[in-house]
Amino acid sequence: MLERIREGSQGFWAKAILGLVILTFALAGVGSYLNAKTDVPVATVNGDDISQSSLENAYQNERARMENQYGDAFANLMADSDYMKTFKRGLLDRLIADKLVEQTAADLGMRVSDTQVKEALLAMPEFQIAGTFNNDRYQAILRQAGMQPQDFRERIRLDMTRQQLVRALLGSEFSLAGEVEQAYALQQQQRDISYVKVAAEQFLDSVVVSEDDISTYYQSNISSFDTEERVALRYLELTIEDLMEGVEVSEQEIDEAYQANMDQYRTAAERRASHILLELGDDEQKVRAQAEELLTRINNGEDFAALAKEFSADAFSAENGGDLDWFGRDVMDPAFEEATFALAKEGDVSEVVESEFGLHIIKLTGIKAEEVQPLDAVKDDIITQVKRDKAQAEFYQLHQQVAELAFEQPDNLEDVAGLLDKEIQTTDMFSRAEAQGVFAGNQVLNVAFSDELIEEAVNSEVIDVTPEHLLVMRVAEHQPQRTRPLEEVAADIEAQLKADKAQNAAKQWADELVAQAAGGEDIQAKLDEKSLVWASEAGQVRYGSLLPPAVVEQAFKLGTEANMAAVNTADGNVALVRLDAIHAAEKAEDAMLAGLEQRLSSGRSQQLYVDFIEALKAKADIEIHAVQ
C-alpha cells in the first residue's frame, strides 16, 4: 500500500490538485509554526491535542485572507457572533483533518529527509532578503518567536510529511479516455422537445381542504410560523457632508490655504535635451580628447543628432539623435542636471560634463518654465477643501459631545437632537432580514437588537458607521419572536394546501395522459378539452437553457421509447414533456477533451479527499472541547 501511495504522489494530478486542498500551510502559514505554544487544547484527536493557539493562528491568517478578498462584506459578517462561531468551528474541522492525516502518515511510515526540510526553509519568503535566504533574518525571527531552530525544523518536517500523503492520495485519481468521451457526449448532446404547461388552477375546484388538514399542517410545520424579532428605532445621524453645508469660508482662509498648499498648484520647470555619452575606459585621456574634439565639431556646425547616433554610448537615445525627452529636477545625475538647467536657450550646447556614467555633451532642445495655477483657477477646489477641513474638526468635537450626552441622558435623544440641531428620525418595524440602508450592517444590527437597548431602554453608544458618519439610536418599539397562532395563519395555510392539492391533481391527470400515450392512445382530445397546446423547442442543451429547469431536466432523462413524462414545475404547476429527437454531440477537439479530463479528475480527487477524511473520522476518537 505504501509503495502505491508513493508512486501516485509523483503524478501530474498530485501536484495540480494539491492547490485545491486547504492544508495547514495554506491555512496558517509560517505564523502557525512561529507562534505555537503550550495551552489549553480545543480538541483531542486519538490522544493528540490541538491547542487553542493553533486554532487562533489559523483564525488570524484565514481572517486576514478573507478581509483582503471580501473587504467590508466580511467585516459585516464578523460582527455576527453566530457566524463567527461557525467560522471558527470550520477552521477547527480543518485542523482535525490535518491531525488525522498527520497520524495516518506516521502510521504508514512516511518520512521527509533533512535535505527536503532544508530546501523548504531556504524557499520560504519570510526568511529571504532580495529573494535570497538570509540566516541572520531566519535566526532573528525564530528568536522573536521564542523558538529553537530544531523545533521549527521538526514542525516543517511534520507538515511536509502530511502533505506528502495528501499528494499521493490525490494523485491516484484519473479518468479513462472512454469516460471522458462519454461525459463530453452527454454534456454536449442536444434534444428536440415539446412541452405543455398544465396550470394547477384548473383543478382548484376539485380539491377540498378540511379543518383537520389545516390543523395537521400547522402542527407539522409549526416552526415555520415563528415570527422574527422586530424593532422600530428612533435615531440621529451626522455626516461631515451635513456640517459642510453650514461652513463659511473667508477670503483670508482661502488665500492662506492657497499659500500653504502652493506645491499642489505648481508645475515644476522641465527641460528637454539631447546628449552624447562617452564612457571613461582605461584610457581616460583619450576619451576626454575625443569629447573635446566632438564638442569642437558641434560648435563648428556639424549635426548634433548625427554625431550622437555615431559616437554616443547611450544606445537607446543615440537611435533618436541623443534625445532624452522631457525631465524635471531630481531625475538625472546631479552634474548632468545642473549643466542642462544652466543652458539659457534652446539650441545651446554645454561644455563637456562629467557624471558617474561618463562624459556628456548636452544640447538643450526645449524649455518649460515653472507654472503656478492662479488662485482664481483653483478657488472652488480650495473652498471645498477648507470647508471639509473645518467640518471635520467640528465633526470630531461633536462626536465627543454626542457620546457624552447620549450617556448622561440615556432615556431620550432630545438633548442630542438639540446639540446637532436635527430632528429625531424614526424607522418602521423591521427584522434583521428586513433591515435596509445604514441599519443593514451587522455592526448596527447587533446594537439595535441587543438586550441593553431592548430591556434597559437606553441610548446606544455612538456608532461609527464610517470615519465620517456617526449614528446614535434607541429602540422605540420591540416585538419579540413568537409563534403565530393557528387562527392567524389558517387562511394562508388553506391557500397553500389548496395550491398543493391542485398541483397534485394536475400531476395525477398528466400522469394518466402519459400512461395512455404509452399504451398507444391519442391524448390530443384531452389536451384540447383544457385548451392545452404543445410548444416545440429544437436544439435544447443540458445547461444554459431558458426553459423551466424541471422541463429541461426531465427532457434529458427521457429515452426514445419512454419519451413522455409529467413533472412538477417550480411555479406550482405541472408540465408534460415529450422527447422528439436526440442530436449527438459533434466530435470534440483534443484540447476540449483534455480540459474535461482535468475537471473530472479534479472533482474525483476532491471527493476522494473528503471521503478519506470522513473515513478517518469514523474510526478516530475525537473529543471537541470549548471553542472560544
Image (cartoon, helix red, strand yellow):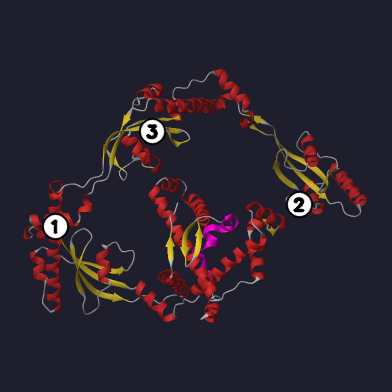
Which marked residue is nearer to the observer: mark 2 or mark 1? 1
Residue matched to label 2: 318
- Would you say residue 337 sits in the magenta stretch? no
Estimate the x, y position of residue 45 in percent, counting from the top left.
47, 65
User: What stretch of residues is rendered in magenta?
Assistant: 16-37
Residue type for callout 1: Thr
Q: Which residue is mark 3?
A: 460
Which residue shows up at 13% across the image and 57% down it?
216
Residue 243 in picture, x, y percent from top left: 45, 26
- State the separation of the CA atoms marked 2 and 1: 93 Å
In the image: residue 13, left or right of residue 322: left
Identify which residue is drawn at 54% across, 70% down. 15
- Specify whether residue 521 is in view: yes
Counting labels gives: 3
Q: What secondary structure is the magenta-colored segment mainly?
A: helix
582 shown above or below 341: below
Looking at the image, do the residues carrying marks 1 and 3 touch, with CB atoms under 8 Å apart? no
Q: Is residue 494 left or right of residue 77?
A: left
* Residue at screen point 43% across, 68% down: 621
Residue at which label 1 appears: 216
Residue 129 seen in the current view: no
> Which amino acid, by three-letter code, is at mark 2?
Ala
Given contact means CB atoms under 8 Å apart, are the residues at marks 2 and 3 in contact? no
**Does 121 sit left or right of 110 as displayed?**
right
Q: Earlier in the sequence, mark 1 or mark 3?
A: 1
Mark 2 vs mark 1: which is more N-terminal?
1
Q: Nearer the viewer, residue 353 or 602?
A: 602
Q: CA distance from mark 2 to mark 3?
A: 71 Å
Does 414 appear above or below 272?
A: above
